[in-house]
Amino acid sequence: MRPDVFRIDATGADADAGRVVWAPTKSLWNSSLLAIALIAAPLTMSFDTVLVCITLTYATLLLGHSVGLHRLIIHRAFDTPRWLARTLAYLGVLVGMAGPFGTMKIHDVRDWAQREARCHDFFAHRRSLWRDAIWQLHCQFEFERPPRFTVESRYADDWFFIWLERTWMLQQLPLAGVLYLLGGLPWVVWGVAVRVVISVTGHWVVTYYTHNPGPGRWSVRGAGVQAANLRGVGFITMGECWHNNHHAFPESAKIGLEPGQTDPAWWIIRGLERVGLAQNIGEPRPSCTWEDIEQISGWPAPQRVRQVCETPITSVRAEVRLPERRSSRMTDPACLESTAGSTDTRPLRNTHTDR
């Protein structure tokens, strides 16, 4: 997350105090699509309907959710022309989870709660798989003392994003019309109902397992919830499974930081950069700014991070804040040299906590 983006004001807020309540709109939306899928999918299944479902599911999750809503709009990890940002946001809305502002709020409130020393099990995903499924797909959290969430003006004042937020459920209808013309009702069942069920449920499954104990190199200091990396599923999760990396370096457009960590969303971003449609690509911040994280395995820094640390801070594209004073942890010669004479004395902020 860029340091000039502050969506969460946690003054007086409590991430643990509150209760889980039924969310009628979310519950009815997910339940109705699940019912359609369970009843109609077996009756309309064929090779072409399954192919349509797989293609649209992967395309909307990859381009719309992972590249668009998550890395571009939520984390601001790179820049694109406005028309492309709107296109990616539209594809993200087609995933069927929420509108752009709703997705931003769900993400940022959850990440803020997880970075607190204590947070409710709703945000920590500590309960059983089935309890968490009911909570995440049919309920919402009602805070006793909620944080304040504010969308930055570049999106809050954009008529297209406002329109998407108000009509995100209805955006399935134009797609359904196109699918009906091309393949009739079977394509609508598999291209809309089955696809949305798979997308929403799959997103929750990845979220659940990446926030439960598992392998990972990094620990976020003071956070009540740590993230895990899920091995072997990089391609089908568009690189979102490397969540331990993501918690440590949320400013990075690339999440699969180590060799062998497949990250298809990063491939798309690099492709956009090569054709001039992506700029200011966020990279992992240098080691001298790791005031909020530590390595828990004792391994050396991954190559991608080490390369950035060898670059003077002034040329690192990920925007960071320098620590108020040098600590014994600042041992990177490049960082020590680049900070000499710096007049920036602002304290380092965790790139998720305050955003």
Image (tube, rainbow, N blue to C red):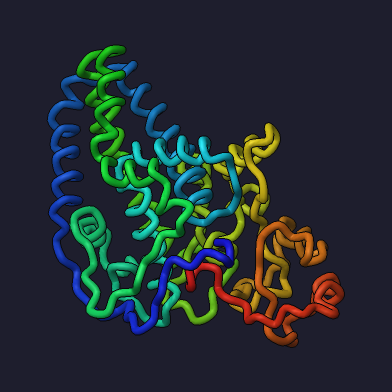
| In the depicted structure, whether residue 247 falls above or below residue 257 | below
Q: Position of residue 76 (x, y in %)?
A: 55, 54
Work out whether residue 242 or residue 90 is closer to the camera in this orientation and state it.
90
Placement of the N terminus among the 4 image quadrants: bottom right
Would you say residue 201 is visible in this rendering? no
Q: Which residue is located at x 15 percent, y 33 percent?
A: 36
| In the depicted structure, whether residue 137 falls above or below residue 267 | below
Would you say residue 97 is visible in this rendering? yes
Q: Position of residue 66 (x, y in %)?
A: 48, 45
Total of numbered circles in the picture?
Answer: 0
Work out whether residue 61 or residue 210 is closer to the camera in this orientation and state it.
61
Q: Which residue is located at x 33 percent, y 16 percent?
A: 48
Q: Which residue is located at x 24 percent, y 74 percent?
A: 143
Would you say 73 lies left or right of 141 here?
Answer: right
| In the depicted structure, whether residue 170 falls above or below residue 138 | above
Would you say 21 lies left or right of 236 here?
Answer: left
Q: Which residue is located at x 55 percent, y 68 percent?
A: 351
Would you say 284 lies left or right of 206 here?
Answer: right
Residue 315's image quarter? bottom right
Q: Position of residue 59 (x, y in %)?
A: 44, 32
Q: Position of residue 103 (x, y in %)?
A: 36, 53
